[in-house]
Amino acid sequence: MLMVPLVLAGLVNEAGGQVRPRLSDWGVRVGVLPRGPHNAITDVAGVRVGHVTVVEGDSINTGVTAILPHGGNPFREKVPAAVVVGNAFGKLAGALQVNELGQLESPIVLTCTLCVGRAWDATVSYLLSLPGNETVRSVNPVIGETNDGFLNDIRARPIAAHHVHDAIRGATSGPVEEGSVGAGRGTVAFGWKGGIGTASRQVPQGMGGWTVGVLVQSNHGGILTIAGAPVGQALDRYYLRGALDDSSADGSIMIVVATDAPLDHRQLERLGRRALLGLARTGSPMTHGSGDFVIAFATRREDLLADGSLSPLFEAVVEATEEAIYNSLLRATTVRGFRGTVEAIPLEATRTILVKHGVLPR
């Protein structure tokens, strides 16, 4: 079994060529707010991300992605948090307590649907092992998932405790690897290879200078639109493309939102609801069989913002969510798996469509 940790050099195409682009590499601007230095969730100071990608032949394509709010003991240094549900066809362990108490006390771990239990148990072991937690008798791991059962033999439940521990302990700040990595290794979005994507936005200094970062695990469907351009229709791959078409927009997406703005649970819930607007901009209708979840947390507690100051943050999370989804598609590479092959979205054809619709200059 091949385990691939966070290695930025691994972002190459199938022919070993250049790294597939992010949307910003094409000069496309989503919204009006500036991106952060890394255009990633890690632009929120203290936030860390780790991946472990698990591959075995053509049958196993899955992994773990861990998001940590800071570098300390998450149980002892809890942060304000909220969970928002768009459509609840999914398994998000720990969500009830997060919303009851308004706090996050664990890493956020993303993996495959049938691996949630194993990831939960491994995260419990990690938390209990931390210095200062020797007498702890209850912890609330937050484990999210999407179903990667087309590319991954999901019934094998290949995730083990060491995969989760390696993702958590290997989490770092700075650039975040995207595409067919970690929990995004086996996912499919809009009929193309999905995966991990991230983006960030910065609120103007005169409005607080806060940062909002988003990371997604995209595995959903719909009618893909990129910055307003009807890419899915132009590529002839979209939901409801014909009366006899049996395509489905079912699937799931996990959206993790981080901010350094001092927000409480109620305000984070409001922020999380706006992330779903960014999802909608990409063409997702959140169908019956889709699990669409947002986990939002803040890294600061003191001097809570007044509600009247939240609107710039709402714009920031919409823009960052939208762009993170695009990055998850553009960065992803073609993967051959358990039930077939899922192709990466074609770059040149997509660029041509964006040019035609004025998103990119001719």
Image: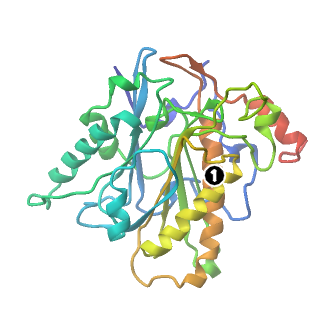
- What residue appears at the point 43 percent right and 85 percent down from the top-left corner? 303
Of the residues shown, which amino acid type is indicated by label 1? Leu
Decide if residue 163 is on the left or right side of residue 338.
Answer: left
The image position of residue 233, as x and y in percent, is 80, 35
Task: Give the residue at mark 1.
Answer: 279
Reply above or below: 166 against 193. below
Reply above or below: 210 against 355. below
Residue 361 visible in this rendered orientation of the protein: yes
The image position of residue 300, as x and y in percent, is 41, 73
- What residue appears at the point 36 percent right and 24 percent down from the top-left corner? 155
Quadrant where the image shows the C terminus: top right
Count of number-bearing discs: 1
Reply above or below: 19 against 78. above
- What residue appears at the point 23 percent right and 43 percent down from the top-left corner? 121
Circle 1: is it few (<14), some (14-19), or many (20+) Cα within 10 Å?
many
Residue 64 visible in this rendered orientation of the protein: no
Observer-nearest residue: 151 or 347? 151
Looking at this view, name the residue that lies furthest to the left: 135
